[in-house]
Amino acid sequence: MLLVPGYTGSKEDFALVLRPLAEAGHRAVAMDQRGQYESPGPDDPAVYTVEALGADVRTVLADLGSPAHLVGHSFGGLVARAAALADPKALLSLTLMCSGPAALGGDRKARIDLLAPVLAAGGMTAVYDAIEAVGDADPRSAAVAPELKAFLRLRFLASSPVGLEAMGQALTSERTGSPSCGRSACRRSSCTGSTTTPGRRRRSMTWLATWDAAYAVISKAAHSPAAGNPGDTAGALRDFWATVERDGP
């Protein structure tokens, strides 16, 4: 099983689900995408397109021994979908975790757009300081352990500024995805946190109905179920993979 993180994320976003998946007998591998944290990326925006990053995922799948189950979180879901569309036979299944059919819009797109001039003027440190200032206004920020805050800053500053900008552009410009993964399509599922806004869940479920996908809501979790409720997230993945392995792709 290969787990792909989202925008500004890294393999550590899945740290809490790896043990329960391993204890259930699965070989679960989490990766950085290029330019994220401990996986350096070049200073070329062209290598951070969804298609290029999807090719990286297919390379990792081949190294692990395809076919495998693939999970993509948020922007990582767009990348995982690109990998599935390019080579569906490399997958046993595809799971999109809090990942919709196309580009971000509305307030979330506006926030990414506002950070572009901050990045140009002050680099990664200025961007993170701006993000942290917004986060500090959220009462939930006080509950975040100091060591986790320190890691999140370290991870962000270790990532590629070119990759950050290019992935942000990809995230806000992706076209609506095809509901098909090809003639020999892999099995598909999606999950989202229960505290995700009802409108966003409704839009995802409408799209998924045409995508012929299973759908799970992870209780007591928001946009990052693997961190917010790792036990139920691992359980939902295990249950879906078991049906795939029982009934076939």
Image: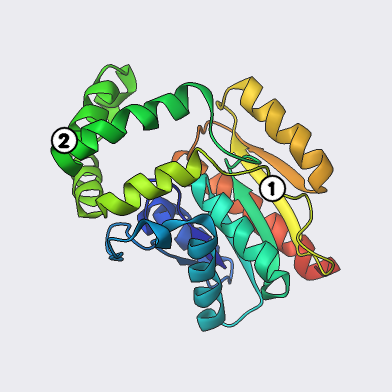
Badge 1: few (under 14), some or many (20 or more) residues near its Cα, within 10 Å?
A: some
Q: Residue at x 41, y 63 (%)?
A: 47
Q: How many marks?
A: 2
Q: Could you say which is closer to the camera, residue 184 or residue 17?
A: 184
Q: Quadrant of residue 43?
A: bottom left
Residue 72 percent location from the top left of the image: 55, 54
Residue picked out by circle 1: 177
Residue picked out by circle 2: 121
Q: Secondary structure at mark 1?
A: loop
- Lower sequence index among marks 1 and 2: 2
Q: Quadrant of the N terminus?
A: bottom right
Left or right of 19 on screen, residue 154: left
Q: Quadrant of residue 149?
A: top left
Amino acid at the residue labelled 2: Ala
Left or right of 157 on screen, residue 190: right
Q: Quadrant of residue 232?
A: top right
